[in-house]
Amino acid sequence: MAKQSTIQQAWESKNSAPYLKSSRRGLDEALVREISQNKNEPEWMLERRLQALELYKTMPKPAWGPDLSKLDLASITYYAKASETENTWDEVPEDIKDTFTKLGIPQAEQKFLAGVGAQYESTTIYHNLKQQFKDQGVIFEDMDVAVQQYPDLVKKYFMKAVPANLHKFAALHGAVWSGGTFLYIPAGVKIDLPLQAYFRMNAKGMGQFEHTLMIIEDGAQGHYIEGCSAPRYGVDSLHAGCVEIYVKSSARFRYSSVESWSKDAYNLNTKRAIVEADAHMEWVGGNFGSHVTMLYPCSVLVGEQASADHLGLAFANSGQIQDTGAKVIHLASNTSSNIVMKSLSRGGGQSIYRGEIDIKARAQNVKVSVNCDALLLDANSKSMTIPQMKIANNTATVAHEARCGKISETEIFYLRSRGLSKEEAETMIVNGFVEPITRELPLEYAVEMNRMLKLEMEGSVG
Amino acid sequence: MKEIIITQRPEKNKTLILDQDCLVFEHLKDNLPDKINTEIIVKDNVKVDYIFVLENINDKVLLENRVIRLGLNSRMHNYYFYLDQNANINLNTYIDTHADFQHQVLVLTETSKLVYLQENHNFLYPHAYGKFRLWAIAKDQSKIHIDSMVSVKKSAKNTEVSHNQRAWLLHPEAKVELVPGLSVEPDEVKASHSAKISNLACEQLFYLQSRGLNQENIKNLLYQSIFQLILNQLPSEVQKENLANILKKYYVNQ
Amino acid sequence: MSNLLEVKNLSVEINEQEILRDLDLKIETGTLHVVMGPNGAGKSTLSNVLLGHPNFKVNTGQILFAGQDVTNLSPEERAILGLFMSWQQPPEIDGVALDQFLFLAYKNIFSARDKAWIAPSVFEFSEILKKQAESLKIKPELLKRSLNVGFSGGEKKKIEMLQLSLFNPKLAILDETDSGLDIDALKIVAENINMYHQNKGTVLLITHYPQILEFIKPDFVHVMVKGKIVTTGGEELINNIKQTGFSSFIK
């Protein structure tokens, strides 16, 4: 038996969540006011929440994609408060710390990380940022705190990249969002170590609506990485987070995430970056968990020479639908995008690549390359590729390639004839298949992702 | 081989049953029917070459729902030419075991024409072969939208499908939307698809210009080359010539 | 001397078609054998079955290797026992780093052969690998790349030979059954096989082409036709085949 994944252990060890007794299910104006009041928010934020709530009430669920009819929005707990914000690791409550220990966070922090912001359900419980970055004016904060301390920045950027009217779950998010990460990197500041946060859903029927807002000023550089996990519970839980990233002129930013929500969760996440002239945005993502995932990180290339890379990996195991992809909107000339997606399906799981390339008429000389590979690991699983390409400018060059198939028997036989077991051979080939994605992650995340893969391959998860 | 020539669409819904090897030449060039539903059934073991030409007729839109059913061990090679006529066509195909289905489509639009194709190709049984090729050329302010899904169902093991689309936009205001979809359920399948949308690359243009061609020459050259690609695949010399004559109307022969 | 490999009365089918029929073959430790035969004789099947390819079904018969019945063993169990085949066209496996693959296989094979064996650290192993690669004139950067992806024919062969010396098998099977022989690649194989043979290694070369035998001198030659060994002799058989092909062996 292989060593258990730390995330796996964390799943098994549900911490008690007594505070939920006082939290209520369902959504109405009173709850939205209560959230805002609880957080002592300024009036303008309450206004925005209420506007979003109105939109949410009128908008339908998306008519395309996976079936969401079993998602009962009235039985979700939209807001819960777990503990007070802590400044140092020592002050973090023991059971929560234990979970993080299992998730490997403190060691990781010592070795690799510049700072850790970890969200425990709806309230961030731990935040730490290396002093040198603080001195350079970098802000890495709990989103709730940012609303209080940096209202001008938040007001200017909050839900401008992802407006509440984008779709129903964006509207829902706008009404009930809570916690999350705020990152501000001033012009010219380059952070070479990845900043990190970890999110976790811990209670039954618990929604998670964290908001991530990142502003990378002119010529700045950074890398933010987050892992998401959730313990397994019987009631459908919902994650409708939102990530907004503003990459200003000549800045570079990378956003990496490894998501492994519990296998009954709906992960309906919206991620968008606005990329200005000469700037570069990179999305790196791995999706393992959830019952249904709908996640299509989007780059809006608004300035000339802006570029985006989207690297993604999805593993759909038994009972899972991974509907993931990428969206790039080319609004300016000489912009380019590069999309590489890998999907694995096993045990009846379904992987769907849903992509959209939208080249507007005024964007000259756009270059796009899309590459999707799907691997079917058994005869029960399913793969689908739906790449939409809308081209309204004749100077564009768009190339899309996709392949779908199973692991080659010859490859397995070759490796076995050199002494590897069938499982080792399969795992080695699968690791090779996803290597273009994992090599972009920091070492510990790559190791964690490989461990997740191994577990999925053994069938001991799900 | 038997030849079937169709130049008029019937007023009502129609089923065409092909029970012997044949070449069908369907050529719409005079008047457009109202919205119609057609069904084409290729019986077991029958081999069919099917040429469909929709010419530039008027400003109306050809509205059609077409279903094609391929029997066991049958073969159908389609050559569809949508030549600068507004069209909104929904095509559904169902392909039986050991069938060989090749579907090659040329779409050409000028002025402000719109061609909207929604295709679903369904492989339901094992050991079938599917080849899908699309060439799309949009000129002027025209628009081409092609949403094509190739589905290999659970029961269709050992199916081999390839799906390639190539589009050119020859005018700054032309638009193309492609969705080369692929859905695969069984693991014993060979499936690939690719799509490329571009104009002639700068250096290609420059090379041709340096050999004395102007922009118009180059466009016509491109047309000729693409047409030739498809014409070369046609099964009979007579048809090649026939089609070449039709296609001549859509570019300037240099 | 004892038999290292003994194939007894072996019948094998794939997709309900019988490819090998009552095949017998004995190979003594330290000898060099060649199996030749026309296309379709079942030579590739023989090498695949000796290695334990899961697609082939053994209907009757036995494969004894190093005193053990291996007929139903998995490919990896056979590799551990000391059965090795050099593939004519080893697959290209994208993303699987050559050095990582070699380290895992090395650990698996030697730890299973000897319980007391202590695995080298990744650094120690890379030293071992470096030395072996140097002696085969393998460019060190090749070891970091994906297994066989984009390798030349000669490089692929060198990687196969590197594994031959690394894994120290009892029997080396050489599969050179396909057409399109690359003479440079062949010389690399011949040189290493001869060296291996001189160090008391046992060799089974399976081929269609007499050319390769200009570089390798066999002790025994077997002619295979329609799934059976029909004649066994010495080097003189090769001249027969060179002159008249396989027709004289086909009844």
Image (cartoon, coloured by chain):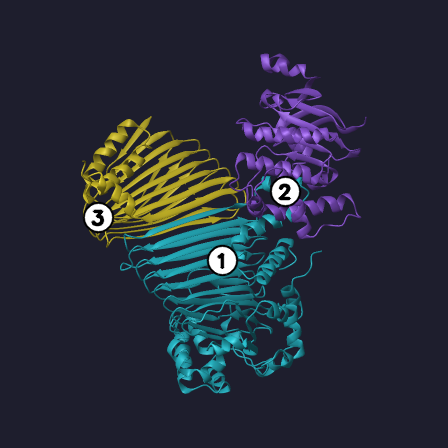
Chain colours: A cyan, B yellow, C purple
Mark 2 element type: helix
The residues bearing labels 2 and 3 have C-alpha atoms spaced at a distance of: 56 Å
Mark 3 element type: loop
**Among the two numbered marks 1 and 2 on one chain, the one whose residue lies closer to the N terminus:** 1
Tag 2 and tag 3, C-beta contact below 8 Å? no
Q: Share a chain, discs 2 and 3?
A: no
Tag 1 and tag 3, C-beta contact below 8 Å? no
Residue at image point 63% right, 13% down:
C240
**A293 or C165: which is nearer to us?**
C165
Q: Residues within 10 Å of mark 2 (few under 14, many from 20)?
A: many
- Does A57 sit left or right of B205 as displayed? right
* Residue that label 3 marks: B110
In this picture, is B11 found above or below A259?
Answer: above
* Residue that label 1 marks: A312
Residue B141 seen: yes
Mark 1 element type: strand
* Residue that label 2 marks: A415
Please state the horizontal and vertical placement of residue C34, each as a whole percent of the image.
67, 23
The residues bearing labels 1 and 2 have C-alpha atoms spaced at a distance of: 27 Å
Which of the 4 quarters of the picture holds residue C172? top right
- Of the two numbered discs 1 and 3 in the rendering, the one whose residue sits closer to the viewer: 1
What amino acid is at disc 3? Glu
- Of the two numbered discs 2 and 3 in the rendering, the one whose residue sits closer to the viewer: 2
Which of the 4 quarters of the picture holds residue B132? top left
